[in-house]
Amino acid sequence: MLARGELIAIGGKAKSGKTYVCSIFAALASCESVLGLTGRPGAKVLWIDTEQSEDSTQEILCGRIGALIGHTPDPEQYIVYNLRQQHWQDRLTLVTSAICMHTPDLVIFDGIRDVVGDINDYQQAQDVITKLLSIASTFNTCIVCVLHQNKAIEDKTLRGALGTELQNKSFETYECTKDQDTLLFTMKQTATRKYDISSKLNFSVNDAGLPELAQISVPVQCATPSAGSRTYASSPTVGEDVLKNVRTRLLESKQEQWSYDHLKTFIQQITQNDKYVFQSNVIKLLQENGVLVRNDTGHGIIYQVCNPNEPLIF
């Protein structure tokens, strides 16, 4: 977690706890442990805020991070810039200058969307991510980039071309969610190039506005599927005939490698189903049945079609 010289992506819907998670990461620079996460005392943190007001930014620094570490943050260790008033065309230059000037160990960039004019402009997205990767490598710093997910409830991809490029180039990606019934926040790893983290961070916010570990009750499983059972074959949303049809069309295409977005578009054309969750389930089930293999090339995630000569049994 928080590898130096890399980009880390934190995504989630609006008000899902992304800034709380960033506050926890920042507090780790002064503590041995925060909410069960291992700290790196003495690390220098640069916090760049493009969304909050200056008062809100100061409240996060002094009220939240200060409370988590137990004292007023040292301004030599915690450097904060609020760029909300700056024009978007100037922000990336200001971010670059701040990193060059302070050479931090950790950069919290909340949020990266505000350094582009059009979040769906692929050239802008590529330029921004390439620049940040270069800075992270040059100064051996970890840059945590915060970006919203798409607004549709079932769509958990990061927004726009910028989100696609960030997901492809990040060392790790984390997702923040909030349960509206329990008001419980959860952070989990959704992608990594090296270190798999299966556990989730579950926390609530107390009356003082501070995150604290939440106790989770684990439901008892009534039954375990027998070995070799095809749990997903009878899925109410993805039928066996759909999976076989998609697999056949994939083989007929003669294309061995696919991006995630290209796969979704291909599945939509075949099934005439434009639901994101449906397309995701098809991809997931094809992976689980050995039709597709997911690979991280170092330049992005690709899916490879496998076993073209084997009969398909779901």
Image (cartoon, rainbow, N blue to C red):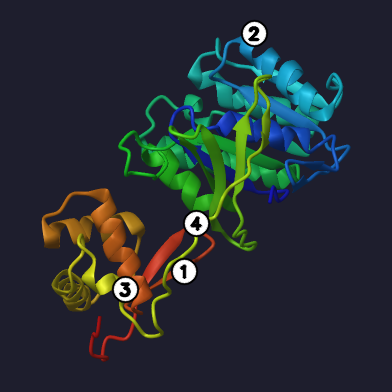
Q: Quadrant of the C terminus?
A: bottom left
Which of labels 4 and 1 is toward the front? 4
Distance in Å between CA atoms under marks 3 and 4: 20 Å
Report the disc number at residue 295: 1
Report the disc number at residue 219: 4
Per the image, label 1 sits on a secondary structure element best described as strand
* 19 to 268, vertically: above or below: above
Residue contact between numbered discs 3 and 2, judged by CB atoms under 8 Å: no
Q: Earlier in the sequence, mark 2 or mark 1?
A: 2
Residue contact between numbered discs 1 and 3, judged by CB atoms under 8 Å: no
Report the disc number at residue 231: 3
Q: Position of residue 187 (x, y in %)?
A: 57, 44
> What residue is shown at x 75% (from left), y 25% (from top)?
65
Residue contact between numbered discs 4 and 1, judged by CB atoms under 8 Å: no
Q: Position of residue 268 (x, y in %)?
A: 17, 56
Distance in Å between CA atoms under marks 4 and 1: 33 Å
Q: Is residue 312 visible?
A: yes
Q: Earlier in the sequence, mark 3 or mark 4?
A: 4
